[in-house]
């Protein structure tokens, strides 16, 4: 175990650990701290589970469903289908209820940009009025574009080997794997509440 002879201020010998910058008021101190202090200092703060109005972070499933539909099933800015739910008006800390018309979908990149102040609330609200996925007609996941034929598609316990049409009901094609012409494929699906209610 490595020990220092002194803390430099006449204090007792201490185990050398990582260096940390400590702020006290406007002053900064670079100092050596113990491993335990360092781990405690870098541990992320736990997220609050409720805000000052007692509103939980847990959004009810029916509100989530409406938010997904309003946002076009993807980030309102880029259409990415990997997303988080974000309160836009007011922010979650000030919200008194989960309202589907006050929440949108943001991908991790745009959510982080918003949190760091690199993306304004006005830009998000403008995108929410005309979500990317609704404008172009689909949400997307760039990881899926790496899939090529032959393809094995699993849907529950069913396995489809190199499928073109996966699900057709009443003559209407609901789920298919389409060739994009550049050697890549796309999963294309049509889902609606009206159709689900008819079963």
Image (cartoon, helix red, strand yellow):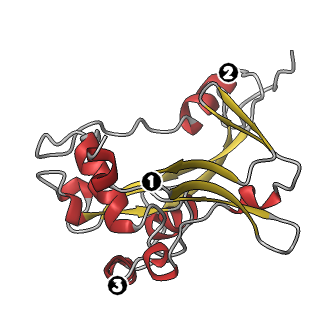
Disc marking residue 130: none
- Position in image of residue 80 (x %, y %): 57, 64
Question: Which residue position holds label 2?
Answer: 12
- State the image quarter where residue 189 is shown: bottom right
Residue 141: x %, y % from top left: 65, 60
Q: In the visual, does 4 lie left or right of 186?
A: right
Q: Nearer the viewer, residue 1 or 84?
A: 84
Q: Are marks 2 and 1 in contact (CB under 8 Å)?
A: no
Distance between mark 3 and mark 1 Cα atoms: 18 Å
The image quadrant where one finds the C terminus is: top left
Element at label 3? helix
The residue tagged 1 is 84
Q: Is residue 59 visible?
A: no
Q: Return the disc, 2 or 1, that comes first in the chain's sequence.
A: 2
**Horizontal and vertical percent position of residue 108:** 55, 58
Say which residue appears at 28% left-offset and 41% top-offset: 61
Specify whether residue 199 is in view: yes
Which dot, 2 or 1, sits closer to the camera? 1
From the viewer's perspective, is 89 left or right of 118? left
**Front disc: 2 or 3:** 3
Label 2, label 3: how many angstroms apart (C-alpha)? 60 Å
Residue 56, picture quadrant: top left
- Disc 2, SS: loop
Q: Position of residue 195 (x, y in %)?
A: 33, 52
């Amino acid at each position: 175990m490595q020990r220092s002879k002194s803390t430099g201020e006449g204090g007792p010998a201490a185990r050398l650990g990582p260096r940390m910058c400590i702020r006290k008021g406007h002053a900064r101190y670079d100092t050596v701290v113990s491993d335990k202090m360092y781990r405690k200092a870098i541990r992320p703060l736990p997220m609050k589970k409720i805000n000052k109005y007692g509103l939980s972070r847990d959004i009810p499933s029916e509100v989530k469903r409406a938010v997904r539909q309003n946002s076009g099933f993807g980030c309102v800015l880029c259409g990415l289908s990997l997303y988080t739910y974000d309160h836009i008006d007011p922010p979650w800390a000030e919200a008194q209820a989960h309202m589907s018309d006050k929440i949108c979908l943001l991908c991790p990149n745009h959510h982080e940009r918003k949190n760091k102040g690199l993306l304004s609330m006005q830009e998000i609200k403008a995108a929410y009025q005309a979500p990317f996925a609704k404008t172009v007609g689909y949400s997307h996941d760039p990881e899926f574009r790496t899939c090529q034929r032959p393809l094995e598609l699993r849907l529950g316990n069913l396995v489809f080997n190199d499928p073109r049409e996966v699900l057709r009901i009443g003559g209407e094609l609901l789920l298919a794997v389409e060739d994009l012409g550049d050697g890549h494929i796309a999963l294309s699906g049509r889902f609606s509440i009206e159709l689900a209610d008819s079963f």
